[in-house]
Amino acid sequence: ANFRSGRVELVVRAAGSDSVEIRKAVDWLSSTMFETDLRAENLPRIRDAIDQELGQLRGTMSNSEESWVQNPAYTYWRQNNPLLLSANSFLTRIHMLHRLRWLLRPSGSPTEGDGFSRFMNKLAATCSHANRDRIRHLLGVLSGDKTDTTAVEAEVAALANQAIKLKPETGPVIADALKDLKQSLSDLPDNSVGNDIAYLCKEMDADFRFPAQQALDQIKAVIALVFREDNARGFVIGSATSQKQIGPALTAVVQKLDKTPSVRQTYADKPLVTNHLKERTPGLKHPLFVGLVNENTRSGVFVNTAECASLTDSDPEKLLNFVSARLYGGGGAHSMFMKTWGAGLAYSNGLRSNEANGRIVYYAERCPDLAQTMSFVVNELKKAPHDPSLADYAVSQAFALNRAGDTYESRGEAMASNLADSLTPDKVKRFRSTIMDLRKDPKFYDKLQSRMESVYGLVLPGYGPGAQESVDKADALYFIIGPEKQFESYQNYLHQVEGDFDVQRLYPRDFWIMRPVPNDPGI
């Protein structure tokens, strides 16, 4: 997925080290694309694969910060594109795989009066107006973790027991439902937790009653839309001899693609995450500062971005801004990375203009206190000396994006992706040649330094233009991740430097694509 261009693709790769392996690799590629075993008889294996992927995704936020924290921020940036979210947001995909587990689970009776259905609807009604502690206690009682019960909890437990007596195989289904609800509880905000649990109950019930074979048929229909000849591209990396050897086999693969013209899908242009936030925050307009609450850590993360310049740009003004953003980027002794790291206020961090996505980025993770880290960076830039020697440093940083050290195969695939996004070598050459021409100006450094406040200020609250101006001017995004304590500290800082702005709390649930009416069956 390319967040800037919006390109989203299903990629199937195959590789071999000699002519025999290469032919087998192409056969495997063809089998993967056209012989996927989506039969009802294979449902146990399909569900196993879903469970494995779901387990990995649910553990994402327990991994090192640098491996995942930028994903929610860029997902929020492109929240109007549900295809991007579905393919590349781990928070969105968690809920989609959760739904697939229930859609592909064989149901007993599809009727509304089934014991499981009556239990889930009763549970939904009981939870809809309850707080987090009450819901946690109720789920614990139903799971057998707790024994002390109230009359309401006893009533729900009795309904579950009745459902199991009427249909013994309902027991494992109810147990799985309770397990999923307990896992989802931490993904929900306090001010909507009751309604969200009720939604999940009704959604699981509707998906469970939906025929698994029909769900498989719908999945096949989606795959058929993807595997159209005019919707495909391919890349081959290898010697001319190897390419000649596998040419006929690759042609055979292409010939299997459907010749029916593709119809480009259109999606409602709606800010999915912001709309979820507004539903539970009456009166909220467009939030300037947002963050993903993560109570599993003590530290905080910044991912602030704004429009700058991309490899497709050649306007001198844009490129001067781009190079100015590199003055204190990189790993030089004077850089914000080294100074912040040396002060113990962040681990991986830094300021840079990213020519790949066209954004200037301030990124810092494992910050002991977000307010202290931001204040430190702003103060360091405010007292930055006049140093013309940084001109060449900034230009060298502008050439930091380089694939020369990558593997041959990854370089070839990246070239193919660039061409798919209409990023040709001529455009890259023009971008870099323009920077070198700008460097010839005797006042080059002075121009760079004079722009620091207007450029860095786009992503550093308290430095340069105000946040609202930066949002209007450069599509600025201010995103943090951390526990509530970090939100409070950073919000106090913002009140001092930006005005009466609150940091709006986001939760994994806000990234879900949810159905308006959970009781309507089907994908």
Image (cartoon, rainbow, N blue to C red):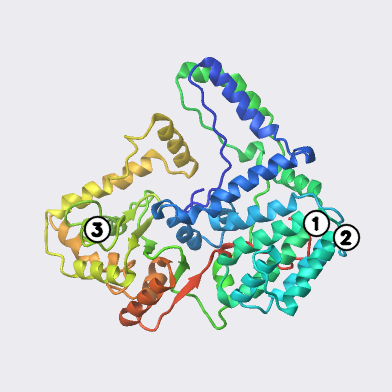
Is 256 rendered above or below residue 204?
above
Query: Is residue 86 rendered to the left or right of residue 314?
Result: right
The 10 Å Cα crowd at callout 3, few under 14, some 14 to 19, many 20 or more, is some
Q: Is residue 38 visible?
A: yes
Identify the residue position indicated by label 1 in the image: 170
**Which three-letter amino acid code belongs to the residue tagged 3?**
Trp
Q: Residue at x 53, y 67 (%)?
A: 507
Q: Earlier in the sequence, mark 1 or mark 3?
A: 1
Closer to the camera, 154 or 101? 154
| Residue 81 quadrant | bottom right
Residue named by callout 3: 341
User: What amino acid type should be assigned to the residue bearing mark 2?
Assistant: Leu
Q: Which residue is mark 2?
A: 166
Residue 3 in the image: x percent, y percent?
A: 48, 53
Where on the picture, by quarter, is residue 390?
Answer: bottom left
Q: Are marks 2 and 1 in contact (CB under 8 Å)?
A: yes
Q: Is residue 486 left or right of residue 388?
A: right
